[in-house]
Image (cartoon, rainbow, N blue to C red):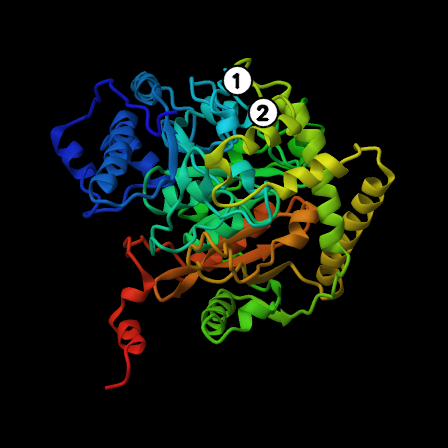
Amino acid sequence: MRLFVAVAAPFLLLSNANAEALSKPADAFPPGVVDAQKLMTSGKATSVALVKLYLKRIATLGRKGIHLNAIIALNPHAAGDARALDAERRAGHVRGPLHGVPILLKDNIESDDGLATTAGSLALRDNVTHRDAPMTARLKAAGAVILGKTNLSEWANIRSTRSLSGWSGIGGLVANPYVLDRSPCGSSAGSGAAVAAGLAAAAIGTETNGSVVCPSSVNGLVGVKPTVGLISRTHVVPISHTQDTPGPMTRTVEDAAALLTVLAGSDPEDPATAAADLHKADYVVALHADALQGKRLGVLKPEFATHRLLAPIYAAALEKLKAAGAELVDVTLPETPTLDKNEGIILGTELKADLNAYLATTAPAVKARTLADVIAFNDRTVREMVIFGQETFIRAEEKGKGLDDPAYVEALKAALTTARETLDHALEENHLDALVSLTTGAAWRTDAIIPNRGWGGVSTLPAIAGYPHITAPAGQLNGLPVGLSFIGPAWSEARLLAFAYAFQEQGARFVPPTFVKSGEDSPEIRAAFAPEQ
């Protein structure tokens, strides 16, 4: 499979001056969703011009030797789709805030544009299904241009407990655009790196546990892991129907709200979304700079957040929350010693059942039709097994006994009860509007020998509970972004986005990356590495 599909169609600009202005990334960072729409509304750009801008930036970074490996494939129809949307605009028809805006999809989300949906695996390199996932169809109906597919941790990081975040057999290793030898976190690594680097207005990721919020945090983005069931998962390569959900990854809260407004909604093919139409909202309308006035926020203190380098960042973020009018209450959550074990049973059982069901519907050219077939494919494919194995796949295949297995049913009930009651109790007992915490630490060095030596995070409870979890930029540690999490009960996305927006308005904003080769290249660290003179 080619990593990039050339877009040969000519581009139409409103003027040479506009084209020149848009083609200089050094002068102005490429626009996000809201800013791109403003450019088109004002006549300063067209959708085709924006597609050209992002493609040029992708090519320019590559020519400069900055190989992020964030994109697996580009949509050959993007320019044509943009031209059609520009024609609609000239005719007086604008579909909404996403009209003409170029968006990237994580490559486990299907799109009917001739591209394969691979989940990063060579076993799915021919998986051209000619289907739009319902969430993709919603984006297209709203006028978004699907620019292409982003790289990811292969199989969304479920193949092995030793997997390397951001690596896939098809896409290679994603680099963090802030410091290139640091991890982009997984599994929506390419989505995070691409948006942070300005390769598209926004991207969609997916999360089972941490895979939207972690890459968003370490790439300086706003990431929304919504209530499970707010966004359809149909035609998304699955891990777990209990925990899987797509979510937007953007540079601002406004952009995330605009995307979520379009993505949210019921899908008859996904029973988990039955109540989505009752709970979805116009999330942009909910954004107010004074949203935190008089609100009570529970402050979590996970161990990593007390690290001497992270604690000042957290303290500064909390001061911004107080400046926005929030009352802060320290909260200690109880230990949940059986939660990880029960989650393992849930994910292993659902992985086998859900993936087998998905693989049965893949393109005829795909030969791996079951999890067992994928395991056999990996065993005979050298590239797939160079860095890590597939013990999680093997365990799921050997121990997965189906969705009616009593051990699975018991683990599911126990895990949901524990996660939901833990969060609900903390919110209700302390009369809280939300919980806050650092999302995780700064990006760690990429290491293929001892991979994923991260800080830990706060994704597990909301992931298992199916509750919303939003991260927003909070600050930087030696040029590496750190995010602040907002966690609330089911269907509280509008409230959490409003809180994140109020926090953002206190100055907690996206900072563009500088593509530093190594964090150890700073004069201070070089001097410290050398013997004292």
Q: Quadrant of residue 181?
A: bottom left
Q: Position of residue 346 (x, y in %)?
A: 74, 42
Furthest residue toward left: 16
Front-most of residues 32 and 494: 32
In the image, residue 412 above or below residue 127: below
Mark 1 lies on residue: 131
Furthest residue toward bottom: 533
In the image, residue 390 above or below residue 289: above
Front-most of residues 355 and 477: 355
Q: Can residue 267 be seen in this view?
A: no
Task: Name the quadrant of the N terminus.
Answer: top left
- Report crowding for label 1: few under 14, some 14 to 19, many 20 or more residues within 10 A (C-alpha): some
Q: Can residue 198 be seen in this view?
A: yes
Mark 2 lies on residue: 235
Discs 1, 2 touching: Cβ within 8 Å? yes
Q: Is residue 517 left or right of residue 98?
A: left
Q: Which mark is residue 477?
A: none
How many angstroms separate mark 1 from mark 2 (CA)? 8 Å
- Residue occupying the point 48% across, 45% down: 387
Q: Is residue 422 left or right of residue 328?
A: right
- Specify the amino acid type for callout 2: His
- Residue occupying the point 31% across, 75% down: 529
Q: In this view, does 429 lie to the left or right of 99?
A: right
